[in-house]
Amino acid sequence: MDFHLTEEEKMLQATARGFAKKELEPVAAEVDEAEQFAMDNFKKMAELGFTGMAIPPEYGGTGGSMIALVVVMEELAKACASTCDIIDAHISLCARPIYLYGTEEQKRKFLPPLTRGEKIGSFAITEAEAGSDISAIKTTAVRDGDSYIINGSKLFITNGPVSDIVVVFASIPALAPRGMTAFIVETDTPGFSRAPQYKKLGMRGATNTELVFDNVRVPESNRLGAEGKGMRICLATLDEGRLGIAAQAVGIGQAILEHAIDYAKERKQFGAPISQSQAIQWMLVDMAVKVQSARLLTYQAASLYDESARISKEAAMAKLCASEACMDMAVKGIQIFGGYGYMMDSPMQRYFRDAKLTQIYEGTSEVQRMVIARALLA
Ligand SMILES: Cc1cc2nc3c(=O)[nH]c(=O)nc-3n(C[C@H](O)[C@H](O)[C@H](O)COP(=O)(O)OP(=O)(O)OC[C@H]3O[C@@H](n4cnc5c(N)ncnc54)[C@H](O)[C@@H]3O)c2cc1C
């Protein structure tokens, strides 16, 4: 398989790298400490068209392939994983399903403000009793004339504290057990509210909260896809989202590797740089092999997606490999930094905290193994 980027993709990668180095990296620690949605970063990305990636220009987007999206996500995550997290929820989990499953009217109404970054998107499936098992959702959508009345609550929602448009999954009781249906909910709809923002271990510049739906009336024209097709839409959306998380993990991993190499060359003990010790060299080698393997699996899955292939297994493999590699690298990165790696002013502790989330959201590592096992044994 050929992973050479086109000239256009290389230019986009260079633009993203330059932007991330100049605008995101210098504020990444600040953004993490502030524990507020990284609005300045989001606005700057909107100016460059990054909020409209993978959405065609007729809907206000900047277009581009899945490979282009993952290449940019990797660069963003390398500089500031929280900012990449915001973009993953905004594009892969909100704008993309509206583009793929929405009516022409829905696309014309909801996509331009999302792609231009005037509105912020989020995606809501998780509930108190429905985490890994999304089929257990209890949020209901009951038809009432030409509307649906939605009741329930959704946990942990990325961008939830600030989002204007949410792709929400609810079950139509009359169609149970196959009633899961997707809806586009505008957050200024009466009956919609948000709990206070969660305090988190990492990815703290991307904010999360519980979304509450108390008799929220949603017009039929906001139903995304047919009644009862929500599970299919949710799983396909998560396949795409997992590519984004894989790219995010690769970006964090690359940042860890580069910092670890620089530090190992500088730090002297026993009269020589620690990089001359074979123990340190082997850790660096293992890290380099892991991040490159993860990158290749991620590019391969994105490239298959661009060829219109189904990628559930490949996206799960990429996410599993990249997130496990990233966490392992974060542990090794702290080890190479020694005591300084454990201090809050070292970048390693942030990578360590951010890396952990990649093994949990959009399907835990155990869930990715379940998806892969199902495909292997089918
Ligand atoms: C920061 C953050 C952001 C998030 N953003 C969003 C969002 O934007 N939108 C959204 O809808 N959700 C979001 N989530 C939810 C996230 O996707 C879930 O937390 C995740 O899918 C796991 O669900 P759970 O937390 O309920 O864990 P559980 O499903 O309760 O799992 C607990 C543990 O049991 C394991 N486990 C469960 N079932 C099995 C099994 N059959 N076999 C083996 N092991 C199993 C899991 O792997 C895990 O280790 C977010 C979560 C976090 C932490």
Image (cartoon, helix red, strand yellow):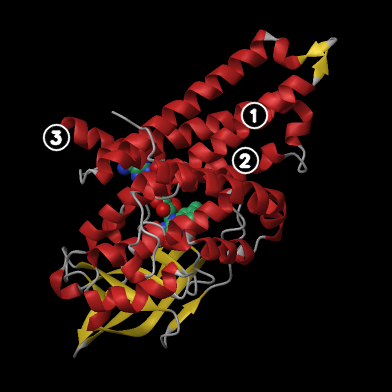
Q: Tag 3 or tag 1, which sits nearer the N-term?
A: 1
Crowdedness of circle 3 by 10 Å Cα count: few (<14), some, many (20+)? few
* Amino acid type of the residue that numbered disc 2 sits on in the rendered structure: Tyr
Q: Where is residue 301 drawn, in percent x and y? A: 31, 38
Mark 2 lies on a secondary structure that is helix
Mark 1 lies on a secondary structure that is helix
* Amino acid type of the residue that numbered disc 3 sits on in the rendered structure: Ala
- Pointer 1 residue: 333
Name the residue located 16 percent from the left edge and 63 percent from the top edge. 177
- Pointer 2 residue: 351
Q: Which residue is at the front of the view, 75 or 132?
A: 75
Residue 11's tag is none
- Pointer 3 residue: 378
Q: Where is residue 261 drawn, in percent x and y? A: 67, 24
Distance CA(mark 2)–CA(mark 1): 9 Å
Residue 212 versus residue 67 in the image, above or below: below
